[in-house]
């Protein structure tokens, strides 16, 4: 799904403080943009022309003239759609406000997860899935339910997969180190102590453990042989949780699709 320039302006992330200021100015004063050069807009926003051009490129246009043209065309078609987004309204339950914002957040989570993806690592993990005798996925709270969904899909293919709501230390300590079990450990921050402990025990048994986390320098990643990076919307905590959920599902679904191609 391709989002237009107005949507990108309203929901763009991540932006610097200067870029956010420029975006807010444009959303509140669109007609001024159509009549100003990059230098003139920079003067009115107390920034620089180079910052204006850099923002235009970040929003997917070739430069300021291209940005002006696309914004003018879209604004002409729908002037009322150019207004500052209010995530507080969205969180309070304004359904109409979510019609554009929720799909954009979903797409942003997917795009950023794909951007951070290391294809050779994903391929290596997909091969481990094929060779495994069992898949264990560890997660707590919301991540446990994501683990259950991923396991349910693999179980439908005849691939044994079990979701664990936190580490089962008896199971971990008695596990055969020669087992063909492949383990995933989910923690968006990578600092969940229970998940770190599970990864540590598995790592000590020299087993293949994959961290599913938003921080590849986290304590969790240090105990894992590979890391799959997740994305989280950084502007608000609640939206970050939603974006992280979509990101985790996307990663597991890619591995699931690779399993389907090998089983059918």
Image (cartoon, helix red, strand yellow):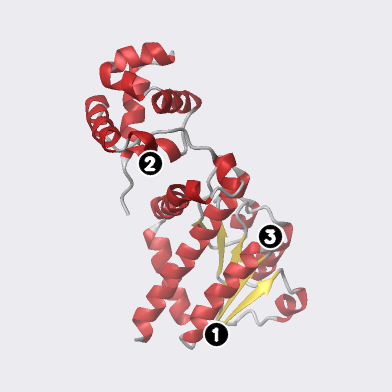
Q: Which label lies toward us, 2 or 1? A: 2
Residue 212, position as x, y percentages in the image: 55, 60
Residue 119 vertical position relative to residue 70 in the rendered view, above or below: below
Q: How many labels were placed on the picture?
A: 3
Along the viewing direction, whichever of 132 and 65 lies nearer the viewer: 65
- Category of crowding for the residue at label 2, using alpha-carbon neighbours closer than 10 angstroms: few (below 14), some (14–19), many (at least 20): some
Seen as rendered, the residue at the extreme right is 170
Write down the residue under mark 3: 196
Residue 246, position as x, y percentages in the image: 50, 59
Mark 3–mark 1 Cα distance, whole angstroms, equals: 24 Å
Residue 230, position as x, y percentages in the image: 51, 55
Q: Which label lies toward us, 3 or 1? A: 1
Q: Which label lies toward us, 2 or 3? A: 2
Residue, x 44% and y 27% (percent of image)? 19
Report which quarter residue 166 is drawn in.
bottom right
Q: Which quarter of the rendered picture does the N terminus lie within?
A: bottom left
Q: Are marks 2 and 1 in contact (CB under 8 Å)?
A: no
Residue 214 vertical position relative to residue 151 in the rendered view, above or below: above
Specify whether residue 217 is in view: no
Write down the residue under mark 1: 160
The secondary structure type at the circle numbered 2 is helix
- Category of crowding for the residue at label 3, using alpha-carbon neighbours closer than 10 angstroms: few (below 14), some (14–19), many (at least 20): many
Mark 2–mark 1 Cα distance, whole angstroms, equals: 42 Å
Residue 141 vertical position relative to residue 99 in the rendered view, above or below: below
Q: Say the numbered circle drawn on residue 10.
A: none
Of the residues under marks 3 and 1, which one precedes in the sequence? 1
Specify whether residue 31 is in view: yes
Write down the residue under mark 2: 7
- Category of crowding for the residue at label 1, using alpha-carbon neighbours closer than 10 angstroms: few (below 14), some (14–19), many (at least 20): some
The secondary structure type at the circle numbered 1 is loop
């Amino acid at each position: 799904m391709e989002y237009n320039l107005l949507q990108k302006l309203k929901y763009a992330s991540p932006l610097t403080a200067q870029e956010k200021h420029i975006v807010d100015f444009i959303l509140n004063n669109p007609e001024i943009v159509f009549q100003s050069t990059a230098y003139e807009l920079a003067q009115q926003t107390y920034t620089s022309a180079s910052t204006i051009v850099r923002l235009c490129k970040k929003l997917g246009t070739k430069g300021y003239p291209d940005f002006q043209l696309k914004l003018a065309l879209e604004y002409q078609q729908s002037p009322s759609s150019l207004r500052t987004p209010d995530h507080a309204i969205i969180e309070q339950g304004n359904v109409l406000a979510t019609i554009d914002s929720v799909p954009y957040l979903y797409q942003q989570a997917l795009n950023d997860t794909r951007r951070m993806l290391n294809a050779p690592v994903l391929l290596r993990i997909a091969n481990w899935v094929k060779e495994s005798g069992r898949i264990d996925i560890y997660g707590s709270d919301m991540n446990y339910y994501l683990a259950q969904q991923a396991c349910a899909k693999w179980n439908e293919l005849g691939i044994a997969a079990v979701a664990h709501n936190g580490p089962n230390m008896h199971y971990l300590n008695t596990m055969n180190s020669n087992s063909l079990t492949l383990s995933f450990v989910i923690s968006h921050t990578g600092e969940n102590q229970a998940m770190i402990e599970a990864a540590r025990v598995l790592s000590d048994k020299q087993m293949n453990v994959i961290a599913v986390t938003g921080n590849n320098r986290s304590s969790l990643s240090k105990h894992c042989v590979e890391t799959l990076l997740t994305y989280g919307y950084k502007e608000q905590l609640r939206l970050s949780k939603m974006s992280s959920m979509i990101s985790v599902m996307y990663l597991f679904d890619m591995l699931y699709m690779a399993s389907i191609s090998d089983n059918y």
